């Protein structure tokens, strides 16, 4: 019996050591909460002046006579970014390369345009309208110009783009001859 009491006492002492520190409720650590990071949307600001070069095609039609030719020039303007809407104005000059329509030489075209469009981050999609003046061998032609275009920021300071314009010239050189013209131009610009 002494042996039984000694074994029981030894077992009680050993089990007491095993249960040490269990008078308090066990601490259960919760799993860490994952941190959700919102994606960073690149912010592009189109506000400021710009200047660049253009190169494209001029197609002109007057009284059933139609001609195509090369056109090139320079432009400059200013845009203001209101968030998703961008508004601005632009002055553009384009010269022709020996362009003649029915014996009438067209030397160059000046344009003063307003433009407004959608800020799609690195891209600007816009519509434009304004005043155009063509200098010809029989006198000046004036009229409305309107169209659409897109600029894309290659870097924050350099853009490339394309623009389509429709011109309605009235009374070329006081001759009561009207003409319609279309231009499609590739453009590159520096933004300041």
Image: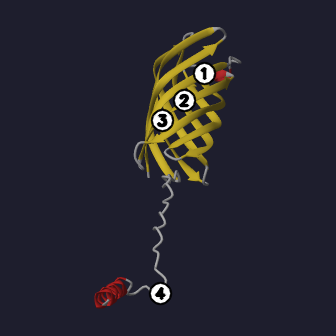
Which residue bears the numbered disc 1? 181
Pick the residue in front: 104 or 160.
160
Q: Earlier in the sequence, mark 2 or mark 4?
A: 4
Q: Are marks 2 and 3 in contact (CB under 8 Å)?
A: no
Q: Are marks 1 and 2 in contact (CB under 8 Å)?
A: yes
Mark 4 vs mark 3, foreground winner is 4
User: Residue shown at 49%/21% (left/top)?
Assistant: 57
Q: Position of residue 3 (x, y in %)?
A: 28, 87
User: Residue shown at 63%/26% (left/top)?
Assistant: 167
Q: Position of residue 58 (x, y in %)?
A: 52, 21
Of all residues shown, which one is farthest toward the front?
A: 1
Mark 2 vs mark 4, foreground winner is 4
The span from disc 4 to disc 3 (Cα, nearest Å) is 72 Å
Q: Earlier in the sequence, mark 3 or mark 1?
A: 3
Which residue bears the numbered disc 2? 109
Q: Earlier in the sequence, mark 1 or mark 4?
A: 4
Q: Position of residue 74 (x, y in %)?
A: 46, 36
The span from disc 1 to disc 4 (Cα, nearest Å) is 90 Å
């Amino acid at each position: 019996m002494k042996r039984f009491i000694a074994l029981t006492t030894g077992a009680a002492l050993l089990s007491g050591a095993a249960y040490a520190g269990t008078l308090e409720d066990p601490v259960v650590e919760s799993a860490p909460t994952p941190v959700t990071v919102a994606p960073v949307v690149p912010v592009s600001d189109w506000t400021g002046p710009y200047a660049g070069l253009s190169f494209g095609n001029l197609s002109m039609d007057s009284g059933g006579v139609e001609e195509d030719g090369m056109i090139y020039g320079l432009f400059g303007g200013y845009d203001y970014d209101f968030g998703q809407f961008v508004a601005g104005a632009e002055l553009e000059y384009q010269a022709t390369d020996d362009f003649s329509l029915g014996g009438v030489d067209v030397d160059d075209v000046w344009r003063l345009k307003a433009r407004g469009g959608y800020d799609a981050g690195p891209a600007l999609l816009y519509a434009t309208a304004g005043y155009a003046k063509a200098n010809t061998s029989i006198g000046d032609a004036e009229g409305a110009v309107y169209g659409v275009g897109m600029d894309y920021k290659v870097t924050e300071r350099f853009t490339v783009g394309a623009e389509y314009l429709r011109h309605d010239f009235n009374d070329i050189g006081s001759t009561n001859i009207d003409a319609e013209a279309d231009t499609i131009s590739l453009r590159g610009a520096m933004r300041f």
